[in-house]
Image (spheres, rainbow, N blue to C red):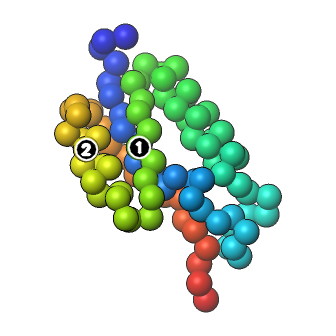
Amino acid sequence: MTDARSVLVIGLDPALMDFSQPGYAPGMDAPKVLAGLKSSEDELTRLGYSVQMCLTDFGETAEAVVQSRLEQKRFDCVTCPAIFGPVET
């Protein structure tokens, strides 16, 4: 599908997150987050979008990874959906 609008979804790699920390939903883990991301990707694809995921670390290489991805091609939409971690009180 060459006419598909392209979307880049940028976010933290759930495999790097510690879901045992207070503040995360009970039972939440990386496979569940990845399944949710895959479901969203599938829905956008079904709607006619070409979707690429760009999962990053917590900052060590995140900027370089995102910059590299943005330099590879032009995207019609770039989104950074929020995945909030635990809130320190």
What residue lies at 45% left-to-right and 48% top-to-bottom? 55
Q: Secondary structure at mark 2?
A: helix
Find residue 41 and report its horizontal and vertical position in percent.
52, 32
Find residue 22 and report its horizontal and vertical position in percent.
71, 76
Side of 49 relative to 43 (left or right) = left
Q: Which mark is residue 68?
A: 2
Do residues under tags 1 and 2 come within 8 Å of each other at their CB atoms?
A: no
> N-terminal of the two: label 1 or label 2?
1
Find residue 4 and report its horizontal and vertical position in percent.
34, 18
Side of 41 relative to 53 (left or right) = right
Q: Amino acid at mark 1?
A: Cys
**The quadrant where residue 68 appears:** top left
**The quadrant where residue 63 appears:** bottom left
Mark 1 and mark 2: span between their CA atoms? 10 Å
Which image quarter is the C terminus in? bottom right
Image height check: is 84 above or below 52?
A: below
Q: How many marks?
A: 2
Q: Residue furthest top?
A: 1
Q: Nearer the viewer, residue 49 or 65?
A: 65
Q: Which mark is residue 6?
A: none
